[in-house]
Structures are given as C-alpha cells and as structure tokens.
Amino acid sequence: MEKKSLLCPVCHSNKAEIAGENVKLSGQFEDKEFLTTKLIVLRCVNCGYYMFFDNTAQFTTEQK
C-alpha cells in the first residue's frame, strides 16, 4: 500500500493530532441504519478540521 503525506483539505497544513482511535460512527438514512468500521480520527492542529481514516491508512512523517 502506498504511503501518502497528510494534508488538511482546508488549510493544507501537514500537522495533525490523534483525536480518537477505533472510533465507530453510526447513523440513519431514510429507513436504514448504518455503523462504520473502526476509524482513526485526526484533528488538524492549525485549523481544527477533523479527518477520518480507516485503520489501513498509512502516512509518512515528513516535516515541511
């Protein structure tokens, strides 16, 4: 699997902190309920944007 550098889609910062691990989201759409697989939640340290990734995501640790 290819590793990608982390980039916030809002402010384009490459720094984030872990806000949660093994998080499951649930919800309802019309008459169906859903539950996601376990996710990693990262929060951009610059603008506070939350990013959600599955447990297979891998990122490099390059500093800019």
Image (cartoon, grey):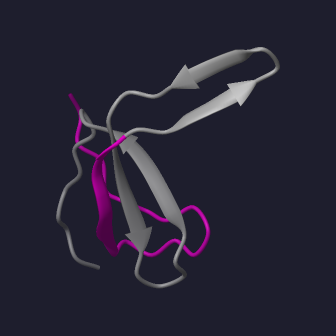
Residue 46: image x %, image y %?
Answer: 47, 85
Q: Is residue 59 magenta?
A: no
In the foreground, 41 or 12: 41
Is 8 situated left or right of 41 in this image? right
**Residue at the (43%, 62%) spot, across then down:** 7
- Front-lying residue, 61 or 24: 24
Residue 31 occupies which quadrant of the picture? top right
Find residue 63 and report its horizontal and vertical position in percent. 22, 76
Residue occupying the point 52% across, 71% down: 12
Q: Is residue 56 left or right of residue 41?
A: left
> Which of 13 and 40 lies nearest the eye of the viewer?
40
Check the image and report above or below for 64 versus 22: below
Q: Residue at x 45, y 75 (%)?
A: 13
Up-down relation of residue 31 to residue 58 (above or below): above
Residue range of the region highlighted in magenta in the rendering: 1-23
Residue 14's spot in the image, x, y percent? 37, 71
Q: Height in image: 56 above or below 50?
A: above
Q: Residue furthest top?
A: 31
Whether residue 19 appears in magenta in the rendering, the answer is yes
Instruction: State whether residue 19 is above or below residue 41.
Output: below
Left or right: 20 as drawn, with respect to 11: left
Q: Residue furthest right?
A: 30
